[in-house]
Amino acid sequence: MRQRPDKQLILDSLAAIARGAGRPPSRSEFASLSGISEHSVLQFFPNWNSALRAAGLSPYTLNLRLEDRELLEDWGCAVRRNRAIPARRAYRHLGKFDHRTFERRFGPWSQLPEVFRNFAQSKPEWADVLALLPVSAPKPVHPGPVGARFSLPRETKGASHAPANPGLRALDSRTRSAEGASPSSPARQGWVKSKKIMSTVGAPPNSPRNRQSPSTSPPSKVRYPPLDHRPIYGQPMDFRGLRHEPVNEQGVVLLFGMVARELGYTVEAVQSGFPDCEAKRQIAPQRWQRVHLEFEFESRNFRDHGHSLTGCDVIVCWRHNWPDCPPHIEILELSSLIKSLPTSND
C-alpha cells in the first residue's frame, strides 16, 4: 500500500517543484508532478496558500483575473522557446498559466494561433513567433442566405433566359449539371436538397410554389455555416430551466448543480484547481462520505488535460468516451442519468 504523505514530504515537494518551475506551483501542477493530492495537502494546512507560505513560497495569485495581453504574451513566449506551437502538456512546462484559462477565455486550444495572430500582427517584436504559426487559410465566401430577397430582371422580348446576376448564373449552371446526373450521384442528391429550399425563390407570393401544405416539413439535414461572434447552443432538451444540452465544462457544472441532490450528492466546495469539486454522498442510511469530483465535458478530457490519477474519485461529464478510464475512477455521465429524472421540478 502506498504510504500516506506527511507534512514534511509535502513541504519538500512544494519547494522542489517551485525551484524547477521558477515560481510557486498551482494546485493542479503540484498534484500532477508530485502525485500528492490536494486532499492530502489540506489534511495539514487550512488552504493552499498556507501550504505555500509554510514552504517559504509566495502565495499563489495566478487565479486572479488576467489581462488578455498577459496570457497571449506568455503563450507567444512558449511558442518561441518551443520553436513550434506547444500542445497543452508541453505548455504546462513552458508557460505560467493553466491551459484551461486560455480555453475559457479564447475557446479551443486549436484556435490560439489565430487569436495570437490577431493580437500580434502589428507588433514587430512578435515577428519571429508569427513566422512559426501556420498561415491562416482565407475564409470561404458563402453565397447569400437561402431565401434572401432579391429581384430578378424582367424578361424582355428576345432576351436570354440566363440570369444577369453572376451568382445566379453559377447557381443555374450547378442545377443544370445536377439535373443531368444520375439520381444516386452526390450532385443529384445535393440538387434535390437545394431544390426543396430554393424552389420558391422568385415565385409570386400567392403562387402554389409558395404555399406550403400543413404536412410539408423543412429538410431535416440542412446545415448552414456558423456566423461569427455568435454563441453556439447544444441540442434542445428543455430540462427544467436548461433549454439546451451542455457544450462545454461550464454547462456540465451547472447541470450537476441542478441534479446533485437527486443523485445523492451534497456539494461542499467548488474551486478552479484540481479537483474541481469536493462533495459528500450518501453510502448508507444516515451515513455520508467525502468524494472529489472533476468536471469535464467529455470524460477523455480528463486524460487530455493531464490530471493526476490519484486526486479524483469521480469524473462528472456530459458524455463518456474514455473506454480506458482507470477502474478506480467512477464516471457520472449526465446525458444518460437525466433520462431517468423528471424534466420539470413541478
Image (cartoon, rainbow, N blue to C red):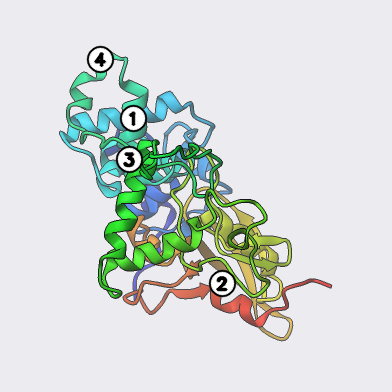
Q: Earlier in the sequence, mark 1 or mark 2?
A: 1
342 w.r.t. 129: above or below: below
Viewer-nearest of discs 3 and 4: 3
Q: In the depicted view, which residue is nearer to us: 99 or 137?
A: 137
Q: Amino acid at mark 4?
A: Glu
Residue 80 seen in this snapshot: yes
The residue singled out by tag 2 in the image is: 334
- Give the residue at x 23% y 26%: 130
Q: Amino acid at mark 2?
A: Leu
| Residue 68, quarter of the rendered image | top left
Query: Residue 195: percent from the left, percent from the top?
Result: 44, 61
Q: Amino acid at mark 1?
A: Phe
Query: Residue 317: percent from the left, percent from the top?
Result: 50, 66
Task: Report, in whole angstroms, how far the alpha carbon at label 2 lies from the one at label 4.
Answer: 47 Å
Query: Residue 16: percent from the left, percent from the top?
Result: 29, 42
- The secondary element bearing badge 4 is classed as helix
Do the residues bearing badges 4 and 1 touch, measured as CB atoms within 8 Å?
A: no
The disc at residue 140 is 3
Task: Report, in whole angstroms, how far the alpha carbon at label 4 lies from the one at label 1.
Answer: 13 Å
The residue singled out by tag 4 in the image is: 125
Viewer-nearest of discs 2 and 3: 3
Task: Report, in whole angstroms, how far the alpha carbon at label 3 lies from the one at label 4.
Answer: 31 Å
